[in-house]
Amino acid sequence: MVSAWSSDVPARSQYYVTGNLTRSIYRDDCRFKDPTTDVRGLKRYILAVQNLFADPKDSKVTLYSVTPIEDNKILAKWSLQGSLKLPWKPYIEPYDGTTTYWIDNEGLIEFHDETWLVRVDS
């Protein structure tokens, strides 16, 4: 199941800045965690991402690799950059990160855990 699922990640990698992800591969109560937020629920996460980034033309994700690392885990390595939806539209310079996707017994993502290779308090 993990190797079959991992083929969807490259096609949908821009969801980090658009919120446009393949809903059918996530549990409705999926947990999304990164260094600054911890959100439970697919709808809440999508809304948060859609309200975070400005014009998708100014924001993008570059996917470096997608690797099954255990029977129930996939590791994606990526770079992200973009403009935030704030009045002054601050631009986030490119930074690298990883996402570990935890897959449940039904083949759905139950936990999306991000790490960033940048300080969040700078």
Image (spheres, rainbow, N blue to C red):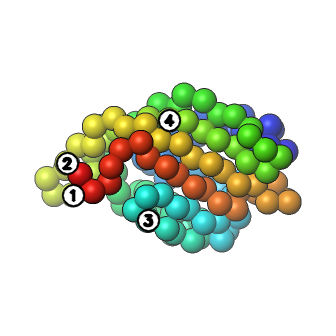
Q: Is residue 14 above or below residue 49?
A: above
On the question of residue 85 being in view, the answer is no
46 sits to left or right of 10: left
Q: Quadrant of the N terminus?
A: top right
**Looking at the image, do the residues carrying marks 1 and 3 touch, with CB atoms under 8 Å apart?**
no
The residue carrying mark 2 is: 90
Amino acid type at circle 1 is Leu
The residue carrying mark 4 is: 78
Q: Which mark is residue 86?
A: 1
Q: Going 23% across and 43% down the picture, which residue do you hit?
A: 91
The residue carrying mark 3 is: 37
Amino acid type at circle 4 is Trp
Which circle's residue, 2 or 3, is located before the other in the chain?
A: 3
Dot 4: element: strand
Q: Residue furthest left?
A: 88
Locate residue 55: give its quadrant: top left
Q: Position of residue 45 (x, y in %)?
A: 51, 63
